[in-house]
Amino acid sequence: MANIIDAIVTLVKRNNFSLKDLNVGNNRANSRSDALELYVKNLFANTFDCVETERLERWNKIFSWLGNSSNPPDFMLKGGDAVEVKKIESNDAAIALNSSYPKHTLKSSSPLISNACRTAENWKEKDIIYTVGVVKGISLKNLCMLYGQDYCASEEFYRQAALKSLDPLGITRAKNFLYQIENPWRVFGYVYQQNVHANFNFMCLINSRMWATLKNRAELLKLQKDYPTLQIVDKQIKNPDNPAELRDAKLITYTLERL
């Protein structure tokens, strides 16, 4: 079962952040948002250099749902997490969620998902990974991965969309049932600051409870020996439901310096 550690290991080892000419079989990405989504799928499946038949076989093993243009999530890992991919064009931009409010977790009972997604496997609730990329032209400049449970408040805070501020952290806005949320770099500026001189920055936060469930975490810890700019440090982050409460988390960062 693929997980967030697999994606981070692929990202660091591949060390290539170009979105140029990404495609799946005969289906070429027709926008930068599509290209980022394909890039992230390839991270989780480690299929950047696969021929079409091998890619299809790996995707069949790893994903239970590959998404559509109308419903969340963008894809689901078989027996694992759901993933939402969001593209923004600057470090200060908010993330447009349209009519879908932020998700602490994803439930199969949600009216927002399609029936095909609901029946793609036997599931009731999945953790959701928000993957946010800052894209400049054909290059990915910054990428962040974090779980909804560390980023978004629980569902009860989003039921009254008429409210100006919808969550305890004050990071979500709604107007006419259209939602937006502050991007992770702004929300977690108290534990992480980008290297503005770097060619690429990666940031990931994983709370300690979730970290303990990732059985391949030793692979990532070992990778630090070969990649000096890959760092894993302990931090404390705010509980999105109650910011007065801090929870332990791992902050994982990777930086590619300018050549």
Image (cartoon, rainbow, N blue to C red):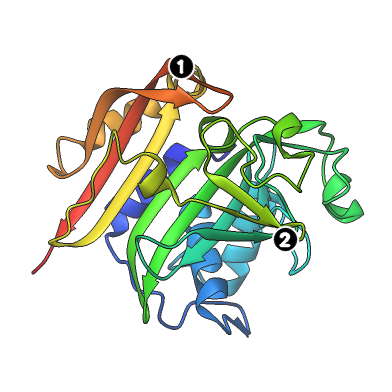
Q: Which mark is residue 67?
A: 2
Residue 44 in sight: yes
- Residue 3 vertical placement versus 17 (above, below): above
The quadrant the N terminus occupies is top right
**Residue 37, image x and y in percent?**
55, 65
Q: Quadrant of residue 27?
A: bottom right
Q: Quadrant of residue 155?
A: top right
Decide: few, some or many residues near mark 1? Use Cα within 10 Å; few <14, some 14-19, many ≥20. few
- Residue 54 vertical placement versus 23 (above, below): above
Q: Which mark is residue 205?
A: none
Residue underneath mark 1: 244
Decide: few, some or many residues near mark 2? Use Cα within 10 Å; few <14, some 14-19, many ≥20. some
**Residue 133, image x and y in percent?**
43, 61
**Residue 102, image x and y in percent?**
65, 45
Name the residue rendered at 38%, 51% in the picture: 10
Tell me the kind of residue under disc 1: Ala
Is 222 placed left or right of 36 in the picture?
A: left
Q: Describe the element under mark 1 as helix, strand or loop.
A: strand
The quadrant the C terminus occupies is bottom left
Is 212 placed left or right of 149 in the picture?
A: left
Q: Describe the element under mark 2 as helix, strand or loop.
A: loop
Q: How many marks?
A: 2
Tell me the kind of residue under disc 2: Gly
Name the residue rendered at 45%, 52% in the picture: 183
Residue 46 in sight: no
